[in-house]
Amino acid sequence: MRQIEFLAHALRVLERLQIPYVVVGSYASTAWGEPRMTRDVDIVIALTEGQVDHLCDSFPDHEYYVSRAAANEAVRHGSQFNVIHPASGNKIDFLIAGQSEWVRRQLCRRRKTAFEPSVSGYVASPEDVIIGKLLYYRDGTSEKHVRDIRGILKVSGQDLDRDYIASSACQLGVHDLWTSIAADIAN
């Protein structure tokens, strides 16, 4: 199973179960910037305890690995769990939407986009992808996040709401990092 097929299945499941979601991370940065390979897909979901079994049942044991215990734990603690397709090695990380204002804004600001002609779904806005990448960079300093930000600025820069990015970056404690990267790109 190709990664895009796994993503398509997951998005159909989320939409059928009416679980609000937004694709984030590298898959989202590729939607608004320059493409790059990624080993997994990150999806923020607003999952309730009552939906866990339905979601897990949608990934049958004979084809996927998902831990119901991990999914329930993630819902209780606002963390994450994953679904793996062992035959291909593909993985989806489901991140439980917390109560933070920024996470709620991501879900509200999400945009429907086509990942391929036959696969579409909700992806984080380019501004929210940049903010997420700033947070990931702050927490892990991986240069891939800065490359993703540069790619979004290069491809979608003229359409970005930079005031939104600046105010959100300020609220989340990454404003200095944002101004540094934006200034570096401008030069």
Image: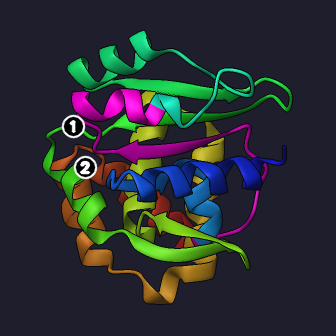
Q: Is residue 43 magenta?
A: yes
Q: Which residues are magenta?
A: 32-55
Q: Which residue is situated farthest in the bottom direction here?
A: 158
Residues at marks 1 and 2, CA–CA distance in whole angstroms: 7 Å
Identity of the residue drawn at 48% across and 59% down? 181
Work out whether mark 1 precedes mark 2 in sequence or the reverse, and give the earlier one: 1
Q: Residues within 10 Å of mark 2 (few under 14, many from 20)?
A: some
Identity of the residue drawn at 32% across and 55% down? 20
**Element carrying mark 1:** loop
The C terminus lies in quadrant: bottom right
Identity of the residue drawn at 33% across and 51% down? 19
Q: Is residue 3 magenta?
A: no
Give the label on residue 103, or none. 2
Q: Amino acid at mark 1?
A: Gly
Above or below residue 145? Residue 63 is above
Q: Amino acid at mark 2?
A: Val
Residue 4 x/y as whole percent? 74, 55
Observer able to see residue 100: yes
Observer able to see residue 187: no
Which quadrant of the figure has residue 65?
top right
Q: Confirm or deny contact between disc 1 and disc 2 (CB under 8 A).
A: yes
Residue 133 x/y as whole percent? 47, 49
Above or below residue 158? Residue 9 is above
Residue under label 1: 98
Identity of the residue drawn at 48% across and 89% down? 158
Give the label on residue 77, or none. none
Residue 61 x/y as whole percent? 65, 21
Q: Which residue is situated farthest in the top direction here?
A: 69
